[in-house]
Amino acid sequence: MKRYDNIQILRVLACLGVYFTHIAPKMGITGVWGKIANFGASGVYLFFLVSAFLACDSPALRSGGAGRKGRAVRFSYYIRRAFRILPLYYAVILYHFLLHTFLLRDVPADPAGLGWLRYLFLTGAVLPAPDNFWGNLSGTWTISLFAAFYLCAPFLVRMAGEGKEEKGGPARAVLLYAASLLLQQIWIRQSFSDYMMFFYYLHFFVLGILLNRLASCYAPVAAAGRFLLICAAAGLGLYLTTDSIPYFTAVSWMFGLILLLTLNFSWDKAAVKEGGKSPASLCRVLLKTLDTYSYGIYLVHEVVVEGIVLVQAHIPLSGFPVFAIVTLFTTAGVIIARKWIEAPMQRLGEGVAKRVFTNCL
């Protein structure tokens, strides 16, 4: 699978953006800096975009197809993705189950009668929690969306075509993106936006697929130019039909443009330009480490932030002490999660996927 140094940076920035969005209010940050921190919430949509972009380069999806081999490829892909994202998610849910059921004893009533089953079966992308039940337990609302995307990824990638290998280049990907934007607007107008949220957020993932197809067909600058034309057409269509362009949709276009323009960035080239000196090498090591732990940071930090809220109810804390405590406990939690949950489960997933692939052939 091709290495994208620019995407490594973007993924780390997305993770840090979400981190500071959640921690800033607890630190008492307001005003201009508070608004800057709030922009970090857009990191979620950057995660969607980047995940879909990289999925297109997955050997499993690129070599998949119809027939017995295609099914084997898809099953092995699903297994790898499940073992990548679900173990830590369920660890967070188990923590909250024990905390709120036996220690705090503050589990709210769920009129639908689902309760914890909502999180066990990742129904957030299908059936949202009512107002008097948790709708976003430790920031886990996006995990059900990721799971839904990975379930659909083999089919979406095939629908988008192979880009440069087909006549018309990325035309199919452009049409797929237009269809996903239309689907979002239909969902909003039918007042369905609270249900089957995956249809509402699908266009962020499809945008990543479109960007991948543009990158496979053209050089970075040429791809960026064509992408700007696509964004202009999409923006005009949205404005004419809805009188507005959704904020995060516009932000996702900005992220897409940055991704395309930085495709040729390489840490190796940066190090050569510096004569092999340390700054680029140090940045690469730091960002590679943060990237490795990014999923853990994404889930663990919110657990720690919620713990700070419980502490602040009894002890007045703000500013730097909050930052130091959250950072320290997040770092410890992420290292533990990586060693005892993520890494072992990914190795297990690889083994299971290989066995399933072999048995399906």
Image: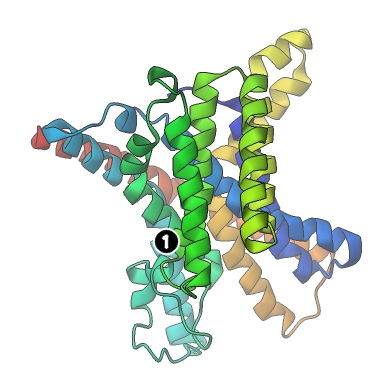
Q: Quadrant of the C terminus?
A: top left
Q: Nearer the viewer, residue 122 or 194?
A: 194
**How far from the left and from the top, in percent, is residue 275?**
77, 7
Q: Nearer the viewer, residue 118 or 290?
A: 118
Tell me if 317 is positioned left or right of 179 in this view: right
Q: Nearer the viewer, residue 211 or 167?
A: 167
The amino acid beneath tag 1 is: Ser
**How far from the left and from the top, in percent, is residue 27?**
80, 67
Relative to 274, residue 296 above or below? below
**How far from the left and from the top, in percent, is residue 344?**
35, 44
Helix, strand, or loop for circle 1?
helix
- The residue lying at 41 percent from left, 89 percent from top is 110
Tell me if 75 is positioned left or right of 81 in this view: left
Relative to 284, residue 183 above or below? below
Q: Residue furthest right?
A: 31
Q: Quadrant of the N terminus?
A: top left
Q: Is residue 293 visible?
A: no
Tell me if 299 is positioned left or right of 236 in this view: left
What residue is disc 1 on? 144
Tell me if 260 is positioned left or right of 24 in this view: left
Relative to 303, residue 180 above or below? above
Q: Is residue 255 visible?
A: yes
Q: Total label count? A: 1
Residue 211 lies in quadrant: top right
- The residue lying at 57 percent from left, 67 percent from top is 303
- The residue lying at 52 percent from left, 39 percent from top is 208
Residue 157 lies in quadrant: top left
**How far from the left and from the top, in percent, is residue 63?**
28, 26
- The residue lying at 50 percent from left, 55 percent from top is 182
Label 1: how many Cα within 10 Å (few below 14, some 14–19, many 20+) = many
